């Protein structure tokens, strides 16, 4: 097992969690995202965290987690939010 790779995944997970906390705590009220965009961003961070954790488990020999539906659903939500944003401008 490559401990450097595990360290990198742990670091990536820590960065994702820190970013999520910053988004929640430091958001400028004058420039707030609408609720759906913010929800999509937070959900994206959650899915990324799951993917990083799954990669760590897979390195240790565990079977892959069933995350395809979560990723596909997130991509659809991102597309929908992006289309709404483009149509508003």
Image: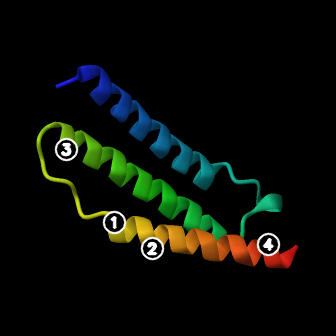
**Viewer-nearest residue: 60 or 13:** 60
Measure how far apart labels 1 and 2 are at the Cα level: 8 Å
Please tell me which residue lies in front, 4 or 32.
Answer: 4
Instruction: Mark 3 or mark 4: name the one nearer the start of the chain.
Output: 3
Read off the residue under disc 3.
58
| Numbered circle sitting on residue 86 | 4
Instruction: Tell me the CA gap for discs 4 and 2.
Output: 20 Å
- Examine the rendered structure and indicate whether residue 9 appears above or below residue 69: above
The C terminus, quarter of image: bottom right
Instruction: Specify which label sits upstream in the sequence, 1 or 4.
Output: 1
Q: 88 or 30: nearer the eye?
A: 88
N-terminal-most mark, 1 or 2: 1
Q: Is residue 41 left or right of residue 8?
A: right
Which residue is drawn at the image coordinates 48% and 54% (left, top)?
45
Compute the Cα span from label 3 to label 4. 38 Å
Other residues around mark 4 within 10 Å, as few (<14) / some (14–19) / many (≥20): few
Q: Are marks 1 and 3 in contact (CB under 8 Å)?
A: no
The picture places residue 41, in percent across and down from the top left corner, at 58, 60
| Dot placed on the residue nearer the N-terminal end, 1 or 3 | 3
The residue at which mark 2 appears reads as 73
Residue 24, percent from left and from top: 59, 55
Which image quadrant is residue 59 in?
top left
Residue 26's tag is none
């Amino acid at each position: 097992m490559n401990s450097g790779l595990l360290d990198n995944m742990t670091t990536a997970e820590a960065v994702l969690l820190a970013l999520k906390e910053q988004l929640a705590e430091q958001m400028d009220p004058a420039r707030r995202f609408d609720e759906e965009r913010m929800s999509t961003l937070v959900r994206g961070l959650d899915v990324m965290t799951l993917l990083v954790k799954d990669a760590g488990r897979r390195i240790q020999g565990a079977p892959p987690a069933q995350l395809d539906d979560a990723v596909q659903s997130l991509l659809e939500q991102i597309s929908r939010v992006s289309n709404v944003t483009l149509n508003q401008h």
